[in-house]
Image: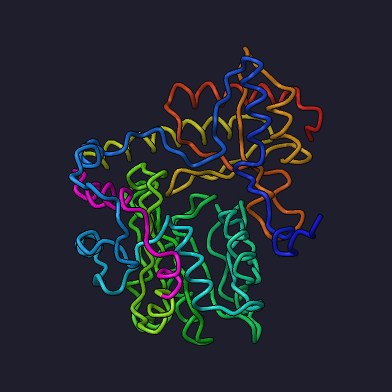
Amino acid sequence: MPKISTKGLAMPASPIRKLVPYADEAKRKGRKVYHLNIGQPDIETPHGAMDVLKNTPIKVVEYSHSAGILSYRKKLVEYYKHWGIDVNENQMIVTCGGSEGILFAFMACLDPGDEVIIPEPFYANYNGFAVTAGVVVKPVISNIENGFALPPVAEFEKLITPKTKAILICNPNNPTGYLYSKEELLELRELIIKHDLYLFSDEVYREFCYEGAEHFSVMNMDGLDNNVVLLDSVSKRYSACGARIGVFITRNKEVYNVAMKFAQARLSPPTFGQVLSEAAIDAPQEYFDNVMAEYIARRNIVVEAINKMPGCFCPNPKGAFYAVARLPIDDSDKFCQWLLEDFEYNNQTVMLAPATGFYSTCGLGKNEVRISYVLKVEDLKAAMVCLAEALKVYPGRK
């Protein structure tokens, strides 16, 4: 048999999906599995957007412009204006999910072997995108004790080498739910200017900020027009993960032109996904008000329940719909697999994501899990009961 590529062997398994076979087997045994492993909301996609998709007059599903349907991009301009972000339709490329936008950023701005600094824990697929692009991830560690706040700028600076070309942040953060403040980001701005780095900002959870906290976009920092790439997606905003629509935005014309070459190579983003996403922008504020209230209720259930469990700690997230919890366990990978293979409580169990997959530094996250609070309140309560009972009998409890 011919050899598998080195790059293929280096591609990490997804901590979000790698336990799916065990979940499938648990279901085959008749157990109910509460899926808290993946950010797939059960919130309905806006009805108006679904109606537009169902009634679309399209007769031929043709390629769109490689940058995306013009009417959609123009509508996005208005969406960003609502958030105080001044961009135009010629500064954005509609992508196949936010994932493709991250790949475009890596490939347009970094050469193989170049380094990108990312606060960890971070969205697990960043590692996969880095391997795909031949980019080296340099993690800067954030701490659960302070809720995973942005590490001090001095810690970033210690990691900068001649190969450092970019910093990547996710705000609000996946997997921690931490919301970076304007003050934290302005400190990072000084470092970006000092070392002339790119700043990639994944802002897909912009709408989900709690307790009156406000999201501050890096697009609104002075003096960084040539440094910043904004990465966005409709997946979580409109509960439209399967639409696979995101957007890559930059005011740097040279970066834009290079990214467009990659966009042209894949021809176009999905047509129906763009139709749905354009219509979703018209979702009324009431939709988001209801969604926000629901997520706050869900977050409170999860955080309060975990912090009542002996030996457990979970910071209170200020954004997104994730939390990272520290548990009294020996190995989160073993624990998450054990939950599906060997544990049941009233014929139910819970599926979590081991936090090891959200760290690049070997050995970190061994006693942490990521929880996506994307299920209805009743199911979350039942899932927390399952988790509490599991921790009482887990053989590797510490």
Image quarter of the N terminus: bottom right
Q: Is residue 33 visible?
A: yes
* Residue sitting at x 32%, y 59%: 63
Q: Nearer the viewer, residue 202 or 185?
A: 202
Q: Main secondary structure of the magenta part?
A: helix
Q: Is residue 86 visible?
A: no
Taking the magenta stretch, the answer to whether it contains residue 283 is yes
* Residue sitting at x 32%, y 50%: 212
Q: Position of residue 239 (x, y in %)?
A: 36, 41
Determine whether, in the image, residue 176 is placed left or right of residue 347. left
Q: Nearer the viewer, residue 188 or 93?
A: 93
Q: Is residue 319 above or below residue 262?
A: above
To which quarter of the image does residue 260 belong? bottom left
Q: Nearer the viewer, residue 77 or 291?
A: 77
Q: Is residue 159 above or below residue 130?
A: below
* Residue sitting at x 41%, y 50%: 244
Determine whether, in the image, residue 258 is placed left or right of residue 135. left
To which quarter of the image does residue 228 belong? bottom left
Taking the magenta stretch, the answer to whether it contains residue 189 is no
Determine whether, in the image, residue 390 is placed left or right of residue 275. right
Q: Which residues are magenta?
A: 261-284
